[in-house]
Image: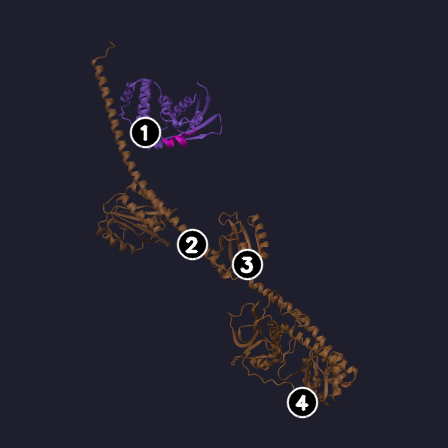
């Protein structure tokens, strides 16, 4: 996994809970903790860190990951505004993941192993999004979509129709965006 | 527990911070390492890009495949640091053939390697090139000296070359060539290098593919260009405005100008003024609709100013982006046109001949009656008798009419010929005095008669008539205001071979005697040349010519198996050439016919066969008057009936017309020979439907005949 994910996690934890909280997480997770954005690190490090956070905050790992996703999006929007600016809605932004954002990610971070998304846009109200990744971080994707909705001032409702963690070949979300703050 | 920090807290904080610093230091060091690695990767990537870009540039700039390959081999050697690089190409049978495209860092050191390699052929699967060609994949040999499938192992050992790599040049999935490289350092397979080579192989494969496509295109272009350039038809591409954009080379042969002469010129400038309108109209119609075709016949100006008739088809390909013009495919049909005109002319002449011959035949029968009757009247009337003078006038008029019908028969080629082997020089020489008198003192008359002239077989009287007619025409052509008028009669031996005899000529190749009569007179205008051999066509003033002179010449020469041609230039003169087939027989001596003053008489039995009753009766009267016993018959069948009832042995002479209903003269004679072999034969005819060429021993009397002619001829045959 690319170091940038760990950097984001560190930034979120430190912003929410302070510098010491991050150090404690590292201690608890028993990982090296020297992450650079371009470096590649074992996926297990993230698992350990999430586990540590879940233990400390008394929450499930999926909730932690989803929370990280939700919190990461504003940071990404500040860092890479040109990906967000052309869009007026979260749906429009999400649809560019495969064609624009991930190819760009691969350029910035050679070797990045990005997930695959598929979309069914036949309905204007509902977006069917499938997610496929060996890391099975569907909660992170869910959090990011929630973050995107918040970014564009929308509400979002998820239905997790199938999940790789339950043995499905891919995760499938039925997503409904609605205009207006929650 | 107080809220104040303790020493332990401080120590813990210090430890945390130290750890944090350590992590940050580690991250920084890693970031620096990543940056260094990235820089190195960038550098390598840049080198690869430079190499590939170099390949692309070389591929695009090279005009020959060898140049592009030489550059590629050199650049790959520079990129990899390997000292030897070489190109092999695949033959159609799959063998890999080493080429002379090499790169060495030390040419002298590898000279032997080069020489030996270039003499080898690598079948599929054999050696480094063969196995790459066979698999279509790169092959890396780490240790050349110990590779079992490397025929040049001994050589590379001597040169201390350790490792080698071969990679395919691919066009799609086909291996079209193999590049092989060798190094003197033992090297394990390098994935980066192999990746670069794969790219290079694809690039160079495209070069080869492009080169082959270009060659195929060039071949195809050459093929079609050759077809166009060697086509005898004229291929012209016109722009929409009628200017010529392309002209095929065959125009040089047909029109005399080079194809370049026509480019950018208006096609209409070369078309006959009378045909421009139709051509332009057809062009406009063709231009209005894409793909439409138009068939046209028009005259096109030759470089020498003459007009050639072209027949062509125009195809509007303006909408076709490749051609973007109107394409004309034309053919010179001048010769065909000439032949068609000649054929029409010949048909016309034949029809006129038929008419003239038919008229002359009937007219001759009438004239014979007039002549014989007037002769009988003249014999019976005293000269002092007033009627004697009228009878004489009738006789003179009949003579003039006889001359006219003879000319008509000559033209219609229905005269009965009595050909002899002749020396034309003798005929001209015999006529010379008469011709000088005819021409008068003002005309310079020259004869050129070579002594070795060949002989011809023709009717001497007819030939004299030809000469006379042509000389009379020449005389009329050199009348004042022609200055220094002259007329030349020349003879010569000529031979026509296939190159002289065109398709339209009516005489076969062979040996001929030419009789040419030329004058320096007014020449014959273009518009009357086509008609000058037609009967009754004359340019002479009323009363001066019958219009039968040239027609007669034409008929006589044709009937004699020859041809007559004319070359004329207005204001400069005319030359008529008569060609008659040359024969090898010796010339016969011609004797003028003896005409005794007193009519000879006789008492023999004469069978007179004549279908025309008036002539039969007249002939019977004349012959009985002269003492003969005459048995008249209306035709051949009637004659044979009479002979059966009468004693055939009594008949001493048969005077018979040639053309009669039921049974003609020739057929009659054939039958009669069985019953009356002793009988002599005298043919008479106004004309014969089919030309009869009678041999020297056969007696013939042309109608109309006079009493004297009949009396003399009958006696001559009976005494002969």
* Horizontal and vertical percent position of residue B287: 56, 49
CB-based contact (under 8 Å), mark 3 and mark 1: no
Quarter of the rendering containing residue B490: bottom right
Decide: few, some or many residues near mark 4? Use Cα within 10 Å; few <14, some 14-19, many ≥20. few
- Chain A colour is purple
Labels 4 and 3: the sequence-earlier one: 3
Res A27 → quadrant: top left
- Look at discs 4 and 1 and give the one toward the viewer: 4
Disc 2: host chain: B
Helix or strand or loop: what does disc 1 sit on? loop
Q: Residues within 10 Å of mark 2 (few under 14, many from 20)?
A: few
Give the Cα separation between the discs numbered 1 and 2.
57 Å
Please name the residue that numbered disc 4 is placed on. Answer: B719
Residue nearest the viewer, comparing B142 with B156 = B156
The residue that label 2 is drawn on is B219
Q: Which chain is brown?
A: B
Separation of marks 3 and 1 at Cα, in angstroms? 84 Å
């Amino acid at each position: 996994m690319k170091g940038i994910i760990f950097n984001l996690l560190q930034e979120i934890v430190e912003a929410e809970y302070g510098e010491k909280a991050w150090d404690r997480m590292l201690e608890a997770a028993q990982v090296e903790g020297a992450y650079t954005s371009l470096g590649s690190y074992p996926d297990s490090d993230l698992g350990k860190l999430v586990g540590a956070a879940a233990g400390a905050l008394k929450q499930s790992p999926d909730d932690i990951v989803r929370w990280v996703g939700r919190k990461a999006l504003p940071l990404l929007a500040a860092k890479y505004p040109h990906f967000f600016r052309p869009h007026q809605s979260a749906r429009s932004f999400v649809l560019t993941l495969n064609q624009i954002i991930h190819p760009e990610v691969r350029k910035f971070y050679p070797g990045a192993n990005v997930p695959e998304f598929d979309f069914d846009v036949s309905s204007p109200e509902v977006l069917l999004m499938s997610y496929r990744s060996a890391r099975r971080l569907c909660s992170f994707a869910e959090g990011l979509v929630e973050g995107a909705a918040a970014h564009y001032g929308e509400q979002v409702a998820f239905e997790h129709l199938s999940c790789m963690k339950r043995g499905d070949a891919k995760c499938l979300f039925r997503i409904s965006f609605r205009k207006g703050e929650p | 527990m107080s809220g104040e920090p303790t020493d332990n807290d401080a120590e813990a904080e210090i430890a945390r911070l130290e750890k944090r610093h350590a992590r940050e230091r580690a991250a920084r060091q890693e970031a620096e390492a990543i940056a260094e690695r990235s820089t190195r990767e960038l550098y390598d990537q840049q080198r690869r890009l430079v190499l590939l870009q170099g390949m692309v540039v070389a591929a695009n700039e090279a005009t020959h495949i060898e140049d592009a390959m030489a550059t590629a081999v050199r650049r790959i050697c520079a990129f990899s640091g390997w000292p030897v690089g070489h190109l092999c190409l695949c033959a159609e049978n799959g063998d890999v053939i080493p080429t002379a495209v090499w790169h060495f860092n030390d040419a002298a050191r590898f000279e032997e390697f080069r020489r030996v390699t270039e003499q080898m052929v690598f079948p599929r699967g054999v050696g480094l090139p063969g196995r790459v060609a066979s698999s279509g994949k790169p092959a890396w040999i780490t240790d050349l000296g110990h590779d079992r499938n490397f025929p040049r192992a001994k050589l590379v050992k001597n040169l201390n070359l350790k490792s080698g790599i071969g990679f395919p040049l691919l066009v799609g999935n086909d291996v079209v060539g193999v590049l092989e490289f060798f190094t003197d350092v033992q090297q394990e397979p390098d994935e980066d290098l192999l990746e670069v080579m794969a790219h290079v192989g694809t690039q160079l494969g495209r070069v080869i593919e492009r080169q082959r496509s270009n060659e195929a295109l060039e071949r195809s272009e050459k093929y079609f260009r050759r077809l166009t350039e060697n086509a005898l038809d004229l291929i012209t591409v016109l722009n929409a405005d009628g200017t010529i954009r392309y002209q095929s080379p065959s125009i040089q042969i047909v029109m005399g100008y080079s194809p370049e002469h026509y480019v950018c010129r208006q096609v209409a400038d070369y078309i006959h003024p009378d045909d421009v309108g139709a051509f332009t109209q057809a062009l406009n119609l063709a231009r209005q609709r894409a793909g439409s075709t138009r068939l046209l016949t028009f005259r096109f100006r030759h470089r020498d100013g003459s007009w050639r008739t072209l027949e062509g088809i125009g195809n509007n390909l303006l909408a076709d982006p490749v051609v973007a013009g109107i394409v004309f495919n034309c053919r010179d049909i001048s010769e065909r046109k000439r032949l068609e005109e000649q054929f029409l002319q010949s048909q016309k002449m034949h029809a006129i001949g038929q008419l003239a011959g038919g008229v002359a035949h009937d007219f001759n029968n009438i004239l014979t009656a007039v002549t014989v009757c007037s002769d009988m009247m003249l014999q019976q009337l005293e000269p002092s008798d007033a009627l004697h003078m009228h009878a004489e006038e009738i006789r003179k008029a009949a003579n003039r009419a006889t001359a006219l019908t003879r000319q008509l028969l000559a033209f219609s080629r229905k005269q009965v010929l009595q050909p002899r082997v002749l020396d034309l020089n003798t005929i001209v020489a015999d006529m010379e005095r008469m011709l000088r008198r005819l021409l008068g003192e003002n005309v310079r008359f020259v004869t050129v008669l070579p002594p070795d002239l060949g002989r011809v077989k023709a009717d001497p009287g007819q030939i004299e008539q030809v000469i006379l007619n042509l000389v009379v025409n020449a005389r009329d052509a050199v009348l004042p205001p022609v200055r220094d008028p002259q007329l030349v009669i020349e003879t010569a031996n000529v031979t026509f071979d296939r190159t002289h005899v065109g398709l339209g000529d009516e005489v076969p190749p062979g040996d001929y005697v030419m009789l040419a009569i030329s004058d320096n007179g007014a020449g014959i205008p273009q518009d009357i040349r086509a008609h000058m051999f037609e009967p009754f066509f004359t340019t002479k003033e009323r009363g001066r010519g019958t219009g039968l002179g040239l027609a007669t010449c034409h008929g006589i020469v044709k009937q004699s198996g020859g041809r007559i041609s004319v070359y004329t230039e207005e204001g400069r003169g005319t030359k008529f050439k008569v060609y008659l087939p040359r024969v090898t027989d010796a010339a016969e001596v011609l004797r003028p016919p003896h005409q005794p003053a007193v009519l000879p008489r006789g008492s023999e039995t004469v069978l007179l066969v004549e279908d025309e009753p008036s002539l039969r009766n007249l002939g019977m009267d004349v012959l009985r008057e002269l003492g003969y016993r005459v048995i008249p018959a209306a035709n051949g069948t009637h004659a044979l009936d009479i002979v059966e009832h009468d004693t055939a042995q009594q008949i001493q002479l048969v005077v018979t017309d040639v053309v009669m209903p039921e049974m003609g003269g020739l057929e009659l004679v054939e039958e009669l020979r069985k019953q009356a072999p002793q009988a002599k034969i005298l043919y008479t005819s106004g004309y014969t439907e089919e030309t009869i060429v009678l041999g020297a021993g056969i007696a013939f009397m042309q109608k109309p005949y006079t009493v004297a002619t009949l009396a003399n001829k009958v006696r001559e045959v009976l005494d002969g």
